[in-house]
């Protein structure tokens, strides 16, 4: 099986402005502590991300919420000068965008309060999704974070042994994520989208 690989592609650390000038318009790249990573998404990676996006959009529409799914934007934590994440799925609250100083000219989010829900579909550099982003997304106050590990790539300490496809539902409680691991026909309980009627397998296989 050929899987996507996230890897730094340059030697010299880049500032956010340098990253934006060279890679800002391409969804393949994100910046972490000055290192540029080429996400190289596989077809299956894109299927899973698209499936979740579709389901989120249906829930937003049904509930009449003033939210939308970010298409090509960046999440630049205001306290991280050389980092710009590019989540696979990010649900944005329109009501908060007036507080985003960069939004009127660039598709860049800096405040966690602007994001209601975020998803990372796991690639070969799974450490970023299971460690770094768990910490940063919690610090930003993002209420719900999904880690969709459709190939069971994560470390044993994160998804158990034997390793298998796993959906991690991270729910913010007292500024930290409580994490529930779901597999197979186990039903998803989402605080953000309580109307979802999906199993972990449906999400991980992108299958209705």
Image: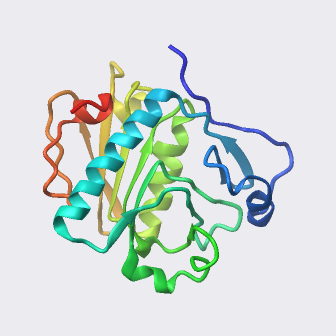
Q: Is residue 137 left or right of residue 66?
A: right
Residue furthest out toward the right: 12
How far across and how far down the image is residue 135, in percent? 47, 57
Q: Is residue 115 above or below residue 186?
A: below
Q: Is residue 45 left or right of residue 77?
A: left
Identify the residue at horizontal 15%, vertical 57% (top origin): 194
Q: Is residue 180 left or right of residue 157?
A: left
Q: Is residue 45 visible?
A: yes
- Frontmost residue, 39 versus 138: 39
- Frontmost residue, 183 versus 93: 93
Residue 25: quarter of image:
bottom right
How far across and how far down the image is residue 38, in percent? 67, 39
Q: Is residue 122 left or right of residue 20?
A: left
Identify the residue at horizontal 46%, vertical 33% (top origin): 45
Residue 142: quarter of image:
bottom left
Q: Is residue 192 visible?
A: no
**How many numbered tags mark residues here?**
0
By what rule are the colours in the image chosen? rainbow
Identify the residue at horizontal 58%, vertical 67% (top origin): 107
Residue 164: quarter of image:
top left
Residue furthest out toward the bottom: 98
Identify the residue at horizontal 25%, vertical 63% (top origin): 60
Q: Is residue 148 above or below residue 43?
A: below
Quarter occupied by the C terminus: top left
């Amino acid at each position: 099986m050929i899987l996507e690989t996230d890897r730094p592609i340059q030697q010299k650390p880049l500032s956010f402005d340098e990253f934006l000038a060279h890679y800002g318009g391409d969804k393949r790249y994100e910046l972490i502590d000055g290192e540029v990573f080429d996400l190289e998404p596989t077809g299956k990676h894109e299927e899973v991300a698209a499936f979740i996006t579709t389901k989120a959009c249906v829930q937003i529409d049904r509930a009449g919420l003033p939210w939308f799914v970010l298409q090509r934007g960046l999440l630049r934590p205001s306290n991280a000068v050389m980092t710009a994440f590019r989540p696979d799925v990010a649900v944005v609250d329109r009501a908060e965008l007036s507080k985003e100083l960069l939004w009127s000219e660039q598709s860049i989010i800096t405040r966690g309060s602007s994001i209601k829900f975020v998803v990372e579909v796991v690639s070969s550099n799974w450490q970023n999704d299971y460690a770094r982003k768990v910490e940063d997304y919690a610090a930003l106050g993002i209420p719900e974070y999904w880690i969709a590990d459709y190939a069971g790539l994560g470390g044993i300490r994160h998804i158990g042994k034997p390793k298998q496809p796993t959906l991690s539902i991270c729910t913010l409680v007292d500024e930290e994520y409580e994490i529930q691991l779901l597999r197979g026909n186990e039903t998803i309980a989402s605080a953000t989208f309580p109307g979802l009627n999906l199993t972990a397998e449906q999400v991980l296989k992108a299958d209705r």
